[in-house]
Image: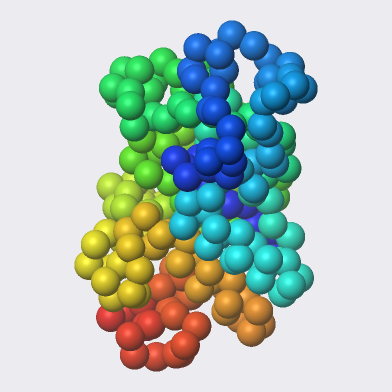
Amino acid sequence: MRILVVDQCSGAKKGTDRSESLNEATVDNEPLSQLVAKEGIASYRAEELYQGRQQRKITEAIQSLEQAGDEVDRVFISAGFGLVNAEDELPLYDVTFADMSAAEIDARAERLGIHDALRSRITDNEYDVVFFALGSDYYRSAKMEPLLPEIPEDTFVVLFNREELESGYDNVVSIPARTPQAKTYGTIVVALKGEYVYNFAFHRQTGTEMSDAEDVEKYCRREPASQTGLGDYSST
């Protein structure tokens, strides 16, 4: 399978205990290529920079998927730099949509071209599954309502906590990832989306095939420890 994981930046970043983070003004006033080349500025690959629990669990999931023979791409929506690839070099920075109003998020997302970059990434590639492991501010920046109709019908799309968006699409599912579900899976809300992707990866490693979006949801919600019971998606 060809899989795309759309992840998001995290507040926990590598190197924050050793280096000063760049602020929004600095990030906006210099090209990324110049920032990462500057002496004294700490920079890392995006997949290494973001150290949140969700991001770390998704890294594990991607390793499992690749071991299963799947081809996986990963991108991040960054409030500082827009849509970035996992291997892109980024400076240590401190910019987040959480500090912005809805209007500010819209304006910044438009300036960074997040929606257009996502649309191109998905429509220019033949993905079997696309995971949008995002929080509400990052969904907003992606402009999901106009994005979903442009995704090919044979691409399965997994959203989280976006039940209002799955209606009318046979290829789209929204999986609840709130406090009750986090308690069921023995984790915390901010890590739960990563746990779902990890569950999916485990079942791919066992050779499980997915024929529709409901299958993808089922194996996201079914824990590796059991094929039935607590991990059964119908009971969570």
- In this view, the residue farthest toward the top is 29
Q: Nearer the viewer, residue 45 or 120?
A: 45
Question: Residue 185 location in percent, x, y?
Answer: 34, 74
Question: Residue 65 location in percent, x, y?
Answer: 67, 68
Q: Residue at x 47, y 88 (%)?
A: 225
Q: Is residue 20 above or below residue 200?
A: above
Q: Is residue 75 above or below residue 228?
A: above
Question: Residue 211 location in percent, x, y?
Answer: 56, 72
Q: Quadrant of residue 221?
A: bottom left
Q: In which quadrant is the C terminus drawn?
A: bottom left
Q: In which quadrant is the N terminus drawn?
A: bottom right
Q: Nearer the viewer, residue 109 or 19?
A: 19
Q: Quadrant of residue 118?
A: top right
Q: Is residue 227 above or below residue 217?
A: below
Q: Residue at x 61, y 81 (%)?
A: 208
Query: Do we see residue 128 in this rendering?
Result: no
